[in-house]
Amino acid sequence: MSTIFIVLPILTLLMFDLGLALKPADFKLIAERPKPVIIGLVGQIILLPLIAWAIILSPLTANLSPLFIIGIMLVACSPGGSSSNVFSMLAKGDVALSVTLTACSSIITLFTLPLIMAWVTQSVGEAVDIHLPIGKLLVQNIVLMVVPISIGFVVNLFKPVAAEKIHNVLKRIAMPALVLLVTIFFFQHKQTIVEQFGSLGLTMSVLILATTFCGALMAWIFRLTTKERRTLVIEIGMQNAAQAITIACSPLIFNNEVIAIPAIIYALMMNLILLAYVGMTKIRKSTN
């Protein structure tokens, strides 16, 4: 079975779930508390791709295929996924800020992702005959992200009770769905993943640790609250692996499952590292 037929419904459900969690008050947060929102978006949209590119230029990725380089940047350019809202809740972070950042980054990256990936693909993709159809990427992102988010938002606006019930169900299946996707993809590409896990696993771990550290540093520099800091650590460090996999596997875009391998490994390392972070926040709270 092609991975695209698995990841498409997962991504659509995750985006619909994000829309269900959105409320008009979440957009007011931009005006009421612009500082954490701006800092979070700068971290997600600008800082994360820069860190990823710096890692790519380092000796760490010297032996990686251009396809993996494209995959790493694709992950770095994807917006924070709806799972970050769950992690923010578990870490006792600012969930409203998390939802706002996820929604805003999902909209902004509709335009920044194609621009950055067009440059990356032109830089390293020629050697492997990979090109990026920007128009098709934009249309696909609108259909798979903007439309389900908008539908979820409208449902929540007019049927808040029903939206809450559906959201409670979907947020419980989001993580198992991603685990299922990773498992299926692993068995389909077992040999390549095992062979590359050492270098790619280290690369993706460094990316996650570097971005989460920068999120914490930015929060400290701008003197954000503890809840805001925890949310920024998670939002800046947690990308939408499902979207990256969809773009990589889509027959309209790259149509290359090898490009999705960094996103699969990223999803695994991301959950392990951020679950450890959530555990640390709970330990610190219990000792205070």
Image: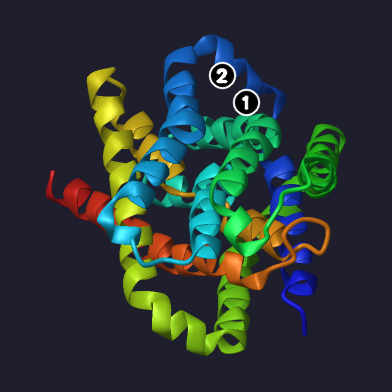
The secondary structure type at the circle numbered 2 is: helix
Direction from residue 181 to residue 207 in the image, left or right: left
Dot label at residue 179:
none
Q: Can you give x and y, in whole percent of width and height, for residue 285 in the image? A: 21, 46
Hey, what amino acid is under mark 2? Answer: Leu
Is 223 on the left-hand or right-hand side of 122? left
Q: Quadrant of residue 217?
A: top left
Q: Which residue is drawn at 72% across and 64% down?
A: 10
Identified at 39% across, 35% down, the residue is 232
Location of residue 108 with respect to 64 vertically, above or below = above
Query: Which amino acid is tagged 1?
Result: Asp
Instruction: Locate residue 7, reporting x and y percent.
Output: 72, 67
- Answer whether residue 181 is visible to the viewer in this image: yes
- How far apart marks 1 and 2 lie (CA) works out to 5 Å
Q: Residue at x 37, y 40 (%)?
A: 51
Residue 31, given in percent of the width and then of the height, sits at 57, 10
Residue 125, how many percent across, how many down? 60, 54
Which residue is nearer to you in this view: 269 or 154?
A: 269
- For residue 22, say whether it is visible: no
Residues packed near mark 2 inside 10 Å, few (<14), some (14 to 19) or many (20 plus): some
Disc tally is 2
Quadrant that contains the C terminus = top left
> What residue occupies the far left of the structure in this picture?
287
Give the residue drawn at x 69%, y 55%.
14
In the displayed orientation, state which residue is furthest to the top. Answer: 31
Q: Mark 1 points at which residue?
A: 26
Q: Residues within 10 Å of mark 1 (few under 14, many from 20)?
A: some
Q: Which quadrant would the N terminus be assigned to in this image? A: bottom right
Q: Mark 2 points at which residue?
A: 29
Q: Do the residues labelled 1 and 2 touch (CB within 8 Å)?
A: yes
Give the left or right position of residue 232, taking residue 96 as reference.
Answer: left
